[in-house]
Amino acid sequence: MSNDFLWVEKYRPQTVDDTILPKQLKQTLQAIVDTGELPNMLFSGTAGLGKTTVAKAMCKQLGLDFILINGSEEGGIDTLRGKIKQFASSVSLQGGYKVVILDEADYLNPQSTQPALRGFIEEFSNNCRFILTCNFKNRIIEPLHSRCGVYEFNTSKKDMADLEKMHHQQDCSCILHLDNYILVQYLHQVVCQVHNVLHRVYCRNTESILQDYYQ
Ligand SMILES: Nc1ncnc2c1ncn2[C@@H]1O[C@H](COP(=O)(O)OP(=O)(O)O)[C@@H](O)[C@H]1O
Ligand SMILES: [Mg+2]
């Protein structure tokens, strides 16, 4: 088990309230937890914004049995159906709905697996709810959109423009006007860049780093 994995799990927020999200989105998700009525949902946004974290936290807070399936690793129709059927066909120990969190659903084939998933959502609707996550919602077919509430985790274009400006001009004065969520996105970008450099150093590819730096 790698340390990366442990850190991601160790510092993963356990409740919606613990996450840093745009105010409106957080209120909407908190209202779902408060009412206890979990709809089918589609979480969309760039990697590392908390989609999987929120999906897990909501299930835990509502005391619902859940299974996490990764669409990029287990994307075949038969595997998917087998897993969902096995999970859905037993009775929940906690009572209530069972939840299938289908991470990275945009990796599922839009011609074959996504239409099949639409069928599974209907077939298991009596005791299952689905939370799909994706980086690009335009890669998810319309019949899945229309069966789910769609929740956008990306920040607005205006906020991203402010971030870009801050980054390029190295002017941090606007940082005071940004909310925590946007700062998380900014730090995430910086961490990804540092990670990229470290990876290249690790691969002894220092020449390409120097080229990038002096170009
Ligand atoms: N909005 C957020 N609030 C708090 N922590 C976050 C948030 N987004 C990401 N994280 C941190 O980053 C880690 C990875 O987030 P994750 O939910 O897997 O992102 P995604 O599914 O959107 O790619 C989490 O374990 C958590 O520690
Ligand atoms: Mg995820």
Image (cartoon, helix red, strand yellow):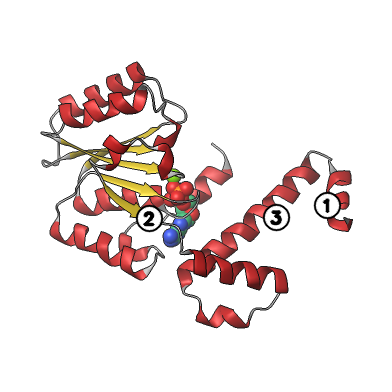
Give amino acid for label 3. Val
Give amino acid for label 2. Glu
Residue 133, placed above or below residue 35: above
Q: Nearer the N terminus, badge 1 or badge 2?
A: 2
Q: CA distance from mark 1 to mark 2?
A: 33 Å
Identify the residue at image location x=47%, y=72%.
180
Disc 1 target residue? 212
Relative image position of residue 157 (x, y in whole percent) = 50, 64
Residue 164, placed above or below residue 97: below
Q: Are marks 2 and 3 in contact (CB under 8 Å)?
A: no
Residue 180, placed above or below residue 207: below
Which marked residue is nearer to the observer: mark 1 or mark 3? Answer: 1
Q: CA distance from mark 2 to mark 3?
A: 27 Å
Q: Are marks 1 and 3 in contact (CB under 8 Å)?
A: no
Mark 1 residue element: helix
Characterize the local packing of mark 2: few (<14), some (14-19) or many (20 or more) Cα atoms within 10 angstroms: some
Which marked residue is nearer to the observer: mark 2 or mark 3? Answer: 2
Disc 3 target residue? 194
Relative image position of residue 11 (x, y in whole percent) = 46, 56
Image quarter (top left, top right, bottom left or bottom right) of the N terminus: top right
Is residue 161 shown left or right of residue 9?
right
